[in-house]
Amino acid sequence: MIDTDLKLAINLPKVPDIELVAIQGLEKMGGYFGISEDKIGEAKVLVTEAIINGLEHSGDDNSNVGVEFKMTEEKLTILVTDSGKGFDPNDVPTPEIKNKLGSINKRGWGLKLIKSMSDGLMIESKPTGTKISIIKNLG
């Protein structure tokens, strides 16, 4: 009998490529439910961007990022939390491709990617940390 939902919660330290640990868990859960590689690939981008943003932008060099997944055959809920300084999502500039092409700084696409690839996004941020909730439909 297949469980109708699976949950995974991990706390990731600020170590290079640590997001790959979360990605491996996501792949295993997707395989358990038989989720298409395309949908899992999209979910991997969402998870990677959210984790990297939490680790790079929290403002705390020693911070950890909490990652939780809840997956059913139809939906993935991703929760990424940090205990950093917080930010105002409305103050994050939307990158312009024509400006990025001519610049040496090609970064800054994470939040835009998350918004465009998710089926729901909620950001709660305050001076004691940020919580990002992402919904990705899998069915």
Image (tube, grey):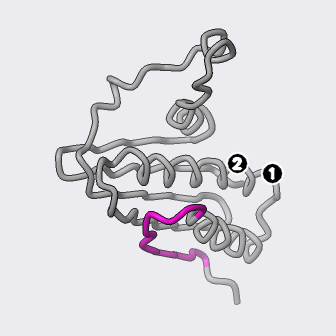
Tally the marks. 2
Asked where in the image residue 127 lies, by quadrant, the reply is: top left
Q: Residues within 10 Å of mark 2 (few under 14, many from 20)?
A: some
Q: Are marks 1 and 2 in contact (CB under 8 Å)?
A: yes
Picture coordinates of residue 39 (x, y %)?
74, 52
Q: Is 12 part of what is drawn in magenta?
A: yes
Quadrant, the C terminus: bottom right
Asked where in the image residue 76 lies, by quadrant, the reply is: bottom right
Q: Is 33 part of what is drawn in magenta?
A: no
Which residue is rendered at x = 49% and y = 20% of the image?
A: 94
Picture coordinates of residue 72 (x, y %)?
61, 67
Q: Which mark is residue 38?
A: 1
**In the image: residue 45, left or right of residue 127:** right
Q: Which mark is residue 48?
A: none
Q: Secondary structure at mark 1?
A: helix
Give the residues in magenta.
4-17
Picture coordinates of residue 81 (x, y %)?
36, 58
Q: Is residue 107 above or below residue 97?
A: below
**In the image: residue 101, left or right of residue 86:** right
* Of the pair 71 and 16, the residue shown nearer to us: 16
Which residue is rendered at x = 59% and y = 50% of the image?
A: 136
Q: Mark 2 sits on what residue?
A: 42
